[in-house]
Amino acid sequence: MNRIGLGYDRHRLVVGRPFLLGGVRIPHTHGPLGHSDGDALLHALTDAVLGAAGLDDLGSLYSDKDPQNAGRDSADFARDASARVKAAGFRIVSLDAVVIVELPRIGPRRAEIRQRISELFEVALDAVNVKGKSGEGFAPIATGELIEVHAVALLERVGR
Ligand code: MG
């Protein structure tokens, strides 16, 4: 039995925060504001895999009210969610995401981001994809103030 999950996230981009995307740090003037490291791509993917498995969502499992999650590396959420999904009897078949942000450009770092996601969620590299889109002139994305991510995950039930 296969299951599809959808994940979505958005973060305000502010001066002086490190820009993390899919667990990869990209040099940029602005970075995502957030209680954790604000990695919108890992947050959306994490919610997609949790959703597909019928588990609790990112906000419930790794609350932004919990001081333990302050400044937290979102790779921890991704690895933990991946383990929970497997413990629930699923294999992650594929992950795909659209990242909507003006700057930095995703293209030059795409291969590295795919590789990192593949490692964190333990999914074959050719079953992980990430596409970048610009704001097409529309604020607040085109003005560099916002990053938005849409992600989907396909899971299959294994061993039962
Ligand atoms: Mg988030």
Image (cartoon, grey):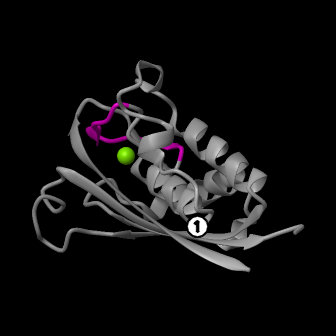
In-front residue for pair 152/111: 152
Question: Residue 68: x percent and y percent?
Answer: 47, 20
Q: Residue at x 34, y 31 (%)?
A: 35
Q: Which residue is drawn at 45% across and 57% down?
A: 44
> Counting other residues with Cα less than 10 Å from the Cα at mark 1, is it few (<14), some (14-19), or many (20 or more)?
many
Q: Which residue is drawn at 52% across and 58% down?
A: 45
Name the residue beneath numbered marker 1.
Answer: 52
Residue 31: image quadrant is top left
Q: Residue at x 23, y 44 (%)?
A: 13
- Magenta stretch containing residue 101, yes or no? no
Q: In this view, does 96 lie to the left or right of 150?
A: right
Question: Residue 92: x percent and y percent?
Answer: 71, 65
In-front residue for pair 112/155: 155
| Stretch in magenta | 23-35
Question: Residue 88: x percent and y percent?
Answer: 74, 56
In-front residue for pair 66/117: 66
Q: In this view, does 87 lie to the left or right of 99?
A: right
